[in-house]
Image (cartoon, helix red, strand yellow):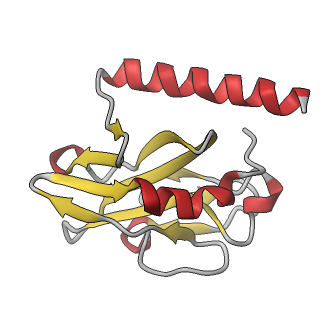
Amino acid sequence: MHKRAIFKMFLATILLLALVGCNADYTTETGLSMPENQITETVTFMPIVVNEMPMEVMFVRASDGTIRVALNTCENCHASGRGYYVQDGDVVICQHCNMSFDIDYIGLNSGGCQPIPVEYSFEGSYVIITHDTLSENYHWFANFRN
């Protein structure tokens, strides 16, 4: 239990630093919103705390210009605590099993070691993920560790 409390404090600190460093907070009481014009070919890993669980969402613009959104974990490796991705060029690589996926396919397919797609919508120039959607998926991050 003590390790979990320290971990939560650590992630909360990272979240705060990330948000302060970005000079923007896209989290709201109703979910997460990301300005579409800030989504580029470089993956944005957006941390958020939902139901006291730190989690992370990936936003990226595919080579055809479309928006891709997924959780930064996968069905196979999430339980290890290291089933999250980092970007290397045009791919993201799982830090547990080293599988790589082209950013053009993020959020399109589910299952295995692919980043878990998450439901989103557009409101004006923002990509929106509702709090309900995030709440339905926070369990994927129960074992996360960096």
The answer to whether residue 67 of the structure is visible from this angle is: yes
Residue 62 visible in this rendered orientation of the protein: no
9 to the left or right of 124: right
Residue placed most toward the observer, 101 or 6: 6
Q: In which quarter of the image is residue 74?
A: bottom right
Q: In which quarter of the image is the C terminus?
A: top right
Single out the residue that lies furthest toward the left. Answer: 124
Percent of width and height locating residue 77: 75, 64
Residue at 15 percent of width and 47 percent of height: 37
State the residue at coordinates (29%, 20%).
Answer: 23
Residue sitting at x 70%, y 30%: 8
Q: Which residue is depicted at the point 75% across and 63% down? A: 97
Q: Position of residue 128 (x, y in %)?
A: 28, 56
Task: From the top left corner, tell me how far across and down residue 137 is, in percent.
Answer: 57, 62
Count of numbered circles on the image:
0
Residue 1 x %, y %: 90, 33
**Relative to 106, 33 lies left or right:** left
- Residue 112 drawn above or below residue 25: below
Q: Which quarter of the figure has residue 116?
A: bottom right
Q: Up-down: is 41 above or below 105?
A: above
